[in-house]
Image (cartoon, coloured by chain):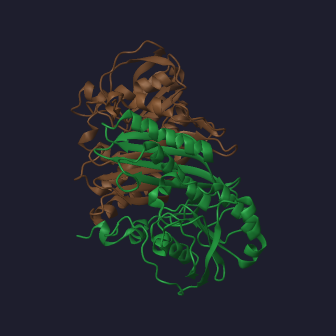
Chain colours: A brown, B green
Amino acid sequence: MKSLRDIGEDALIRRILRGFPGGPRLVVGPGDDCAVVDLGRGPLRLLKTDALVEGVHFLPETPAEKVGWKSVARVLSDFAAMGGAPEHVLVTVAVDAGRPLAWMDGLYRGIRKCLSRHGGVLAGGETCRLPTGAVISVAGEGRVGRRELVLRSGGKPGDLLLVTGRLGGSIAGKHLSFTPRLAEAAWLVRELRPSAMMDLSDGLAKDLPRLAEASGCGFELGELPKNPGCTREQALADGEDYELLLSVSPRRWRAASAAWSAAFPRLPLTVIGRLREAGIAPQLAGGWDHFSPSS
Amino acid sequence: MKSLRDIGEDALIRRILRGFPGGPRLVVGPGDDCAVVDLGRGPLRLLKTDALVEGVHFLPETPAEKVGWKSVARVLSDFAAMGGAPEHVLVTVAVDAGRPLAWMDGLYRGIRKCLSRHGGVLAGGETCRLPTGAVISVAGEGRVGRRELVLRSGGKPGDLLLVTGRLGGSIAGKHLSFTPRLAEAAWLVRELRPSAMMDLSDGLAKDLPRLAEASGCGFELGELPKNPGCTREQALADGEDYELLLSVSPRRWRAASAAWSAAFPRLPLTVIGRLREAGIAPQLAGGWDHFSPSS
């Protein structure tokens, strides 16, 4: 009998989505960083859900406050990836009944800090019992102006590929304390008008082909901005970078690249390659797949 | 060191919510069946998240299609409880990597059936790996007209207490195949203008005191409509009834009670008691608490 690890995550998702109809207000359904809902007037609404699992996304000994921060920051990172901003979040926590109350206090302290730093209001959620371990599932609702929305699918051959920050080695600590790139995304949307954008969660090796495919393009890849001590392989495959990957027309980039350093002097924004015609792409190894035998 | 089972679910929720600010668009925050967001025009938006845990809400041998149905129907039941309707759902599934693909197919078949029967569009979600077992977390977004919104908090002393359907014994099967009372709620809102309403998930013994407290009232309780073979204790304490509990002015009830039987001939709507002044209430034993020692 076939199991999930025989098929892998992307194929699984394609399979389970078969037969689900769209809706009249659902502008963007499964497959982008967020779902997009059009209520007919005002900003578009963004919907996103994301879960952390003890033993997969964090360890039993990880400080609960960092787990709380990460659980919300991941959802905020997806709002950034669409050019949007968070409004309300709902937090579902399933944990064993013997869990220390202090752990729960720490978790919600981290959630509160992340929301108060980056925006978003706790609107609800749930606590329930898990036989063992912990799962934190965060659902978020946000907004994006109609002219600010950036999808994964708008890239064109010839567009430059850029990433914010440096890649690789997130497991050493960044994955628990990263900054969701909301302010950076707002700037990029305003100044560079990206043709496509997403956040890097599973590693460039997995995520870049997804952006290229959604845009109907191939790609070429040059040097990568790496975190200290990281190899190119790690920058490609480690995952959990929570940086932005975007495509931009060369003309826009020439006009605005100098302004970036003035706006965000401590965060690099690096050209790492270029979108090409479909079919032209290097094979990239690695990246995170929840259900592959090696993950 | 204190753990979650030393404090119980309601006290835990009060504790973790301390220090979270509200937001300008959040009309109703944590504590009702759904959060309510006011975007300034058009219908109000409803937000809800709810999780099912293997070994708690269903068994490893429960058919996956029924798990899928239940996971979505619970959220839809909460939209009904506010007088609203579902629009979009996001489904997060965390399962072990060895889970049969056929289980996943069954789960999403159940989700699809429930949405196609009762409304709502799958807008996104996530699959991720859990070391063992399964958690299905469903986030839903819905709408309710400004004049249709019913909270838990609007009940007044003297209002009659009513429930749809019959209570108790849900574990025998109803908890996996119940009908979310969306159509019934729409009728009740239109014809009876309930002063307060909620859905019964943890058992009348737990849920009725919550509605009364939210309304600043006490209550008295008479005969209950019981499922065949159930005692009064079971009707109070079993939980997972997914029926509507509502309070209605006696005048409204006199005017419209006959019309209910014509609209829903197969579903009883029964007066079970009355809201009273605060402080007057019988002690009710039982009902579901995720973190109590006996659950």
- Residue at point 45%, 47% (across, down): B67
Residue B90, compared with residue B57, is above or below; it is: above
Q: Is residue A220 above or below residue B101?
A: above
Q: Is residue B40 left or right of residue A192?
A: right
* Coordinates of residue B61 in the picture (x, y in percent): 36, 47
Q: Taking A245 as reference, is B41 left or right?
A: right
Q: Nearer the viewer, residue A55 or B273?
A: B273
Residue placed furthest toward the right: B255
Residue nearest the observer in this picture, A249 or B290: B290
Q: Looking at the image, is B198 positioned above or below residue B86? A: below
The N terminus of chain B: image quadrant = bottom left
User: In which quadrant of the rendered view does residue A68 lie?
Assistant: bottom left
Give the image location of residue A198, x and y in percent: 46, 33
The quarter of the picture where residue A228 lies is top left
Q: Residue at x 23, y 41 (%)?
A: A172
Left or right of B186? Residue B68 is left
Residue B249 placed where, x, y %? Answer: 70, 76
Q: Residue at x 64, y 57 (%)?
A: B38
- Residue A144 visible in the current orientation: no
Residue lying at 61% horizontally and 38% vertically, measured from the top left: A26
